[in-house]
Amino acid sequence: MQYIPAFSKLVEEFEKLPGIGSKSAQKMAYYIITSDKSVAKSFSDALLDAKQKIHCCRICQNITDKDICSLCADEKRDKSVICVVEKPSDIDAVERTRDYNGMYHVLHGLISPMNDVGPDDVKLSELLVRVSENDVREIIMATSPNVEGQATAMYIAKLLKPFDVKVTGLALGIPVGGSLEYSDSITLARAIENRREI
Ligand SMILES: [Zn+2]
């Protein structure tokens, strides 16, 4: 294939996206350059618009276009329970169970020494501030049941020991090595209901 710098650059950018391999990246790049100019324009506008308007919620670190997200702003939710998840899409998974009425905290990652991700690389200090400044009685560690998820849950449970707060983890039921976001709602609801102290 002939080398066209602008095309290679476009492929390279698509390849950076999670879950996109070089074949898919090439397909996307071909699609963009063979489509009408308006397609590329609305795509790049949407990228920049989302990036400019969306940021992390001041309280729970969920993504929002407001100062605080709709879940934190909801007066009917139980402020004394915080469910800790890895990423914003995990909130959707828990919300789909329609069984949980507490608050959330999004870590934006999992602690993984093997991948050079330490406690300071996730939104952990924000959680400690919330626990120390508010009347929180329970933290539910709902990180995925894989190695990093469990290690993160144990690490956070240890950090929270000095606080007067119960730390629980999801009950088994979610396949080990699986991801919260792909668990079915009934299994996840049961795992939350049968959570155990860690
Ligand atoms: Zn929030």
Image (spheres, grey):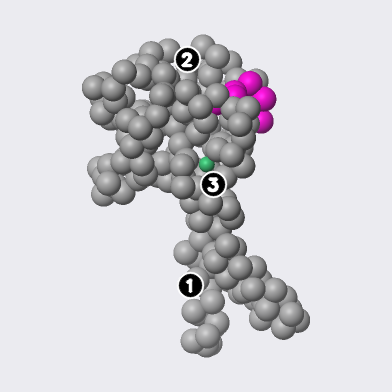
The residue at which mark 2 appears reads as 195
Left of 34 or right of it: where is 107? left
Q: Amino acid at mark 3?
A: Ile
Q: Where is residue 87? Give x, y as percent.
A: 49, 42
The residue at which mark 1 appears reads as 12
- Give me the disc on residue 68: 3
Q: Where is residue 91? Give x, y as percent.
A: 56, 36
Position above or below: 141 against 54: above
Q: Secondary structure at mark 1?
A: helix
Distance between mark 3 and mark 2 Cα atoms: 28 Å
Distance between mark 3 and mark 1 Cα atoms: 35 Å
Q: Where is residue 4? Give x, y as percent.
A: 52, 87
Q: Nearer the viewer, mark 3 or mark 2?
A: 3
Which quadrant would the C terminus be assigned to in this image? top left
Between discs 3 and 1, the one toward the N terminus: 1
Magenta stretch, main secondary structure, is loop
Q: Where is residue 155? Give x, y as percent.
A: 28, 30
Q: Secondary structure at mark 3?
A: loop
Which residue is located at x 48 percent, y 23 percent? Answer: 81
Q: Amino acid at mark 2?
A: Arg
